[in-house]
Amino acid sequence: MKQVVQNYKSGELAVLDVPVPGCKPGGVLVRTSYSLISTGTELMKVSEAGMSMVGKARSRPDQVAKVMQSVATNGLPATYRKVMGKLDSYTPLGYSLCGVVEQVGAGVDDVKVGDLVACAGNEHALHAEVNWVPRNLYARVPEGLAPRHAAFGTVGAIALQGVRQGGPQLGEVALVIGLGLIGQLVVQLLAAAGVRVVGADPDPARCALAEGLGAVACGDPGSAVVENAVAELTDGHGVDQVYLAAGGDSNQPVELAARLCRDRGRVVDIGKCRLDLPWNAYYEKELDVRFSRSYGPGRYDPEYELEGRDYPIGYVRWTERRNLACFLDLAARGRVDVEPLVSHVADFADAVETYRSLEEGELKAVAVLFRYPREAAEAGAVEVGAVEPAAPVVAVPRVPRGSAAKPAVRAGSPVRLAFVGAGNYATSMLLPHLAGREGVELSAVVTTTALSAANARHKFGFARATTDLDAVLGDDAVDAVFVVTRHSSHAELTRKALLAGKAVFVEKPLALSEDELAGVLAAVEESGNDRLQVGFNRRFSPLLREAKERFGARTGPASLRYLVNAGRLEHGSWYLRQTSEGSRFAGEGGHFVDTASWLLDADPVSVYAVATPGNEDLQVVLGYPDGSTATIGYVTTGAPGFPKETLDLVGDGKVLRLDDFVRASVHGKKRWVSSRLPKARDKGQNAELAAFVRAVRTGGPMPVPLESLVATTAATLAVRTALAGGVPVTLAGTP
């Protein structure tokens, strides 16, 4: 299929061939009929992409702050690769469309194949021929509403949420500053609610359009027309509400709002304009300044938008989805007329030229629609599984022996790799070490979102990009599969790949429950294929390996302390979705358990854990067969500037110290201190990948024994049991 994309680094716009997205549970595949260009929001994004790097930084100081924090935590080279990887990638455009349901995912019963729906979201309602849209971001189009008009649904919901924030009442007077697309819709919604509206915009054509759609009077913000109209309609008291629907760097809209608003009036910010509030003017009138956040309640809440958890109507009357449906209903009943706003309808194939015309000012428009070719739709569904809770006593599953493992790659042939998932970790920490590596061929990349696969193919040279996992697993030309998806899918994808006879590299965690771990091992036993590696990379760090060698062999038990200053996650991070993705420690704690076990040359036999209220900070104590102990402090409340990982190993009169993979030392009869790494923190990814590729090529043992991978996973999962019971958990082997 085709999709409009932009490279944020170069500013290049393109209509790209990308795979059709997969139909995941909880949503539907929609074939687009019309999508709407937001001439404000989208053109601002297009304009930002054309800026210099300094200009981009000035326009997004919030992102600059995140970059500086990443430099402090991960080092400059790793941060540079991550940032440049994001910049030099195709990003999608669009967030409002109408189309036909082509496929229905598991758990969806409110629409069927062939239904016409309006869709919202800058990750789901894109300028693309087909989109996957979750349940709470689409609404059925009422009978009689034309698809081209239903494509306005998202921007209509934005305008409607802004009006709701203003709380208009019959007979009031409102001022709308900025008569672009959102402003024109706000004018109509207010008029439909019995409010008399005055509009302000420097463009005479937009003023005339707004008057034709219900405004009493409109004029240039700097002219006397607006002030005279307000004075006449309000007997000189000022308007009840002001809606800021303007953009740009001028502070004029905010100052005009203060001047023309009545005492204790309401000012609602809908657009993205400068907000230097003149303190005296706002204080003296005690103005109520309100913000309208996009489409309504539910926006930016992943549990609502992605997991489909609705808010009870008795507590939240108007959500994103209800606003979308309400606007469609108003349009269907003729209370809002969007046809006069349509300045231009372009064929989707002409998207790049349309954006160019808009950006250069050749095309003057309030709203532009892309028209798509009509195609047939097909039905389908996807099964979903369940995860059961852990048992009170944890047993480490018996590890079956693989029989005829994947044979060595034929001499002279490359190791052919397929990636399932191409998110941030894959593209910043794994693929840069594999792309261009001698003896490696990147054969295929599989994702559920079309653009991420296309980006990976473009940047790293994959032979093909697809959303068809089964086709890749059934391809004899693929030697090994990398599973680099979200945590909840790791075990099932690993199981499928093992059964298909592939060598598998799965990023941590291997599993989120004991049942998932058992399922992976059942696949090993059924297939005889034990060619498995989990991405526990720290044991491969050159600095840590040298430190262990300098520490030398032990004769007695040792004590290990590992402090992980994990830090807080941003609101909305998928790591926080514990119901579907497991706890944060279950997701990444295996890293630290594996490192401790490797340093102590054994697998743990007991686990004890305590946590602060809310399980934010954990202390995990691992016991080992020779009496050694490892204490892992996994904390989220530490100072951001403190190193992320520090480790001390004490035993036999010696101490090994690791400082965040930047410096290491060993103190004993002789003292050894590494030179401080001048550049990157090498946490072992490159060496780990080299070992995995070598094992696949030669048919030799995997870099880490399967028994160790299973023991680490079982110990990580046992932390949950230990927290629940408040007593140590013994890790007992199964017969």
Image (cartoon, rainbow, N blue to C red):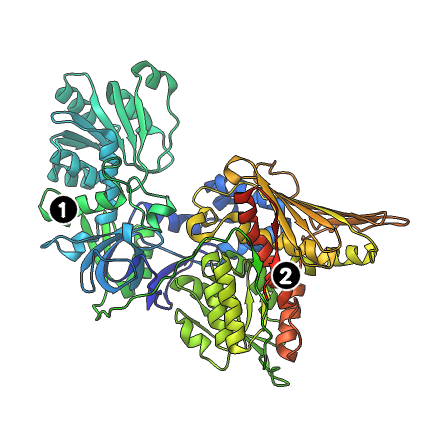
Number of dots carrying numbers: 2
Residue 714, picture quadrant? bottom right
Can see residue 324? yes
Residue at 35 percent across and 16 percent down: it is 283
> Which x, y percent locates residue 149?
16, 52
Label 2 packing within 10 angstroms: few (<14), some (14-19), many (20+): some
Q: Amino acid at mark 1?
A: Asp
> Which x, y percent locates residue 649?
76, 48
Label 1 packing within 10 angstroms: few (<14), some (14-19), many (20+): many
Q: Amino acid at mark 2?
A: Gln
Name the foreground residue: 269 vs 199. Answer: 269
Q: Secondary structure at mark 1?
A: helix
Q: Secondary structure at mark 2?
A: helix
Residue furthest toward the right? 669
Q: Is residue 473 above or below residue 621?
A: below
Residue at 49 percent across and 40 percent down: it is 62
Side (left or right) of 675 relative to 343: right
Residue at 46 percent across and 71 percent down: it is 496
User: Which mark sits nearer the N-terminus, 1 or 2?
Assistant: 1
Residue at 22 percent across and 44 percent down: it is 322
Side (left or right) of 505 relative to 274: right
Residue furthest toward the front? 735
Can see residue 80? no
Identify residue for label 2: 685
Identify residue for label 1: 329
Of the 4 image quadrants, the one containing the C terminus is: bottom right
Q: Is residue 413 above or below residue 352?
A: below
Name the foreground residue: 178 vs 32. Answer: 32
Name the foreground residue: 577 vs 86. Answer: 577
Side (left or right) of 600 relative to 149: right
Name the foreground residue: 652 vs 301. Answer: 652
